[in-house]
Image (cartoon, rainbow, N blue to C red):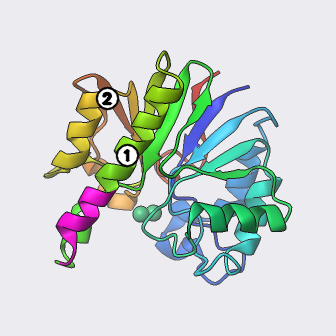
Amino acid sequence: MALYVIGDLHLSLTGEKPMDVFGERWANHTQRLREAFAQLTEDDVTVLAGDTSWGMSLEGALEDFRFLDALPGKKLLLKGNHDYWWGTAAKMKHFFAAQGFSTLDVLHNNCFLYGDYAICGTRGWFYEEDAAGTHTGKMVAREALRLEASFRSARQSAPEKELLCFLHYPPIYQGYQCPELLALIDRYRPVRCYYGHLHGATHRRAFEGRRNSTEYALISADYIGFVPKKICD
Ligand SMILES: [Fe+2]
Ligand SMILES: [Fe+2]
């Protein structure tokens, strides 16, 4: 029994968005994910940190969910900027149940408990979003509220557990910081913060290591070789 994390699977089982256009690094990435997940067991839990499927709707992402559900263990899904299929938690859970998918759940304004840890997270916010120039203050404030709701639910339901923070966007990056989210991380002091979103050449601008009480790590799939990263047993 172990806890894992990986972000940015960018699945497209329908074949509409082949990922090898992004270079050799992405060749056969679906098959490589299947092989890596085959090492996991039914008792394991994996946090999928956003950009999970290219599907434009729940129905459009159906084959990707089917692929995920067939992999061993439970998967906790977090929203990424490319998850256009994302809906309300109730709608997603209803859809998964209707399809008979029993291993998929949603990390959104809530938390999950695993061993000595509480699993918290939200999508987060990144400077690319500011380029659009609209709703910036409102949107980042909403993400901060979601992260705080998640931390709070962990503090209330299991105050003795260490917090783990999962974000899609990096809260800190070379030349960028998201002060609203970093302030929350500094206040609630999760022991680790995992994030994805960065691909290819941007990997080298990732911040990894300790900042205050929290250890940061990039876990986008192409960065970690399409093998889920083990957090703890
Ligand atoms: Fe991505
Ligand atoms: Fe992304």
**Image location (x, y in percent) of residue 45:** 68, 37
Q: Amino acid at mark 2?
A: Tyr
107 sits left or right of 32 in the view: left
What residue is pinned by disc 1? 147
Check if residue 209 falls in the magenta segment: no
Amino acid of disc 1: Leu
Residue where numbered disc 2 is placed: 188
Q: Is residue 141 magenta?
A: yes
Q: Give the percent coordinates (x, y) of residue 44.
A: 73, 34
Left or right of residue 145, residue 12 in this image? right
Q: Position of residue 58 (x, y in %)?
A: 66, 75
Q: Residue furthest front?
A: 156
Disc on the earlier residue, 1 or 2? 1
Seen from this angle, which residue lies furthest top?
160
User: Magenta region's main secondary structure?
Assistant: helix
Tell me if I can see residue 229 in this picture.
Answer: no
Q: From the image, which quarter does the C terminus lie in?
A: top right
Residue ranking furthest to the bottom:
16
Residue 13 on image: x %, y % = 71, 73
Q: On the rendering, which quadrant does ligand 2 occupy?
A: bottom left
The residue positioned 74% from the left and 73% from the top of the image is 62
> In front: 121, or 6?
121
Q: Is the shortest distance between ligand 2 and the CB of mark 2 under 8 Å?
A: no
**Residue at image coords 65%, 68%:** 91
Q: Which residues are magenta?
A: 134-142
Q: Nearer the viewer, residue 78 or 222?
A: 78
